[in-house]
Structure formats: structure tokens, C-alpha cells
Amino acid sequence: MKKKIVDNLILPSGGIDTHAHLDLENFSEDLDAVIKRAELKGVTYIVNVFLDIASYNNNRKLFEKYQNIYFTLGIHPSEASKVGEKDINSMIEIFKQDSRLRAVGEIGLDFYRNYSQKTEQIKVFKQQLEVAKQLDIPVVIHCRDAESDTLKILEDMGFKDRPLIWHCFTKDIDLGERILKNGWMISIPGPVTFKKSEKLQIAISKLPIDRMVVETDSPFLTPHPFRGKRNEPGYVVYTAKKIAEIKGIDVENAWKILSNNAKEIFNI
């Protein structure tokens, strides 16, 4: 008989899931319920990440009645081959017109899947970094199997000490220290709750919590005890709980710190 999962972790309101994809088809049938469940868990704010301009144009309307949901917009590296100069110019205009857009992202490099050529990824990444500099807004970084290239581009383009979140940080202490040395934030996803995530847990034990935020990356990367199910913003409380356990602090205190870090960088 399958063991029933008890979902009884509720944290104080005011929390934030810094990275979700609620505009994807995975949430087409129960978006209202997902958002309400998150609020009941203590997740007052959600940052929805649009992966390209078409997604933003087509799906922004889904969130018109939810003033507690903010946005980021960026062209994902996997879509780099489809991007032209007009897309970059269009992005600039969109940011100027929508006050709920709080960062350029997720942008970066993905040399794991290589859906776009590396040269195309690098070109579009740099173009979007210039947009962030021009508009003076934060950046959310996607990096997969491309750490050295991503770091070099960011450092060469003068992003040290600029507001930046390293999305879905699952690596070791060495990368974490390099990110923090540049004055950036790391965003911790659900896999920190997995037993085999020892390197990540060691990194979190040594890195300061005031440089961390938490995310779900919904519908992906579901934390324990819901691993294998669709992820949703309310589950971010389990990621916060694991960070609190690793750091040896009260979960409500950790929740407050993590949430305040996110609110500051997203100006919420």
C-alpha cells in the first residue's frame, strides 16, 4: 500500500517563490487552485518566468487578476537560434511598458542540450545582458554545463556587484564561492531535499543564507516528499525547511531571511 504524503508545512505569509513557469500547459487546468494553495502555505508572491517573447505576449493575460505575481522575461539559450535583432528591440520596449517585469531572465548558456549552437547562445546571452545594463535591472542566469563560459562573460561584461540571481544552483562550494565573490545571489531549488545532494548540502552549510533565495522552477524539480509529482509554488516551503535544517536555524527565521533577500533584488 502506497504511503500517503502528509502536506502540513505552513509558514508565515510574505514568502516568495522566485522562479516558476505557471504559464506552461502543466497548469492550464488548475492555475487558480495552485496559486491559492501557495498562499495557504505562506507563499504570498510568485515570480513567473517567461522563456521567450511569444510566451509573454500570449500568456501575460493569465495573471491579470493576480497582483502578487511578478514577471521576468528572457530568451532561453535553447531558443537562441530563433532570435533576431528585432526581438532584442522588442524586449526593450516590453520592459519599458510593464512594471511587473522585474528582471531579464532566465538567460545564459546551456551546453548540455545544445538545442542552439554555442556561438548563437553566446551572442544572444551578451545581447540580453546589454539590455539589462541599459535598463538597469537584475538578471536571472540559466547555466548548464557552461559554468566557466558563463562566469567569464559576466565578469568581462562588468556584472560584478550588479543584481543577479544564479537560477537553480545545484553545484558545489567552489562555484558557490565564485558566484558570491562577484556579489550575486544563488537560488536554491527542490533537489536540495534529495538524499544524494550531498555536495549541494555541504555548499549551503558553508555559504551565508543572506545570499540565498528559494525557487521551485515549477513544474520541474519537485522537492521531497513530493518528488515525482508536478512541482508547484507552494512546495517551496520544503526547500526553505531543508535549508533551515542544514543551517541549524528556525525554519520561520530562514523563511523570512530568504524571502527578504528575494524582495530586495526584485524590488517587491
Image: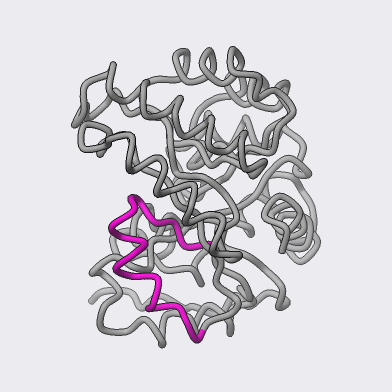
Quadrant for the C terminus, please: bottom right
The residue under the point 28% across, 16% down is 119
In the rendered structure, does residue 88 fall within the stretch colored magenta? no
* Region of the chain picked out in magenta, as a range: 47-65
Q: Position of residue 67 (x, y in %)?
A: 58, 79
Quadrant for the N terminus, please: bottom left
Q: Position of residue 149 (x, y in %)?
A: 44, 14
The residue under the point 33% across, 70% down is 59
Nearest the eye: 126 or 191: 126
The residue under the point 39% across, 77% down is 61
Nearest the eye: 88 or 65: 88
The residue under the point 21% across, 28% down is 116
Nearest the eye: 67 or 179: 67
Nearest the eye: 25 or 145: 25
Q: In the figure, is residue 236 to the left or right of 177?
A: left
Q: Is residue 49 above or below residue 165?
A: below
Q: In the figure, is residue 244 to the left or right of 153?
A: right
Q: Position of residue 45 (x, y in %)?
A: 61, 71
Q: Is residue 202 above or below residue 94?
A: above
Q: How is the image coloured?
A: one colour
The answer to whether one can see residue 237 in this image is no
Q: Position of residue 64 (x, y in %)?
A: 47, 81
The answer to whether one can see residue 115 in this image is yes
Q: Is residue 243 above or below residue 108?
A: below
In the rendered structure, does residue 58 fall within the stretch colored magenta? yes
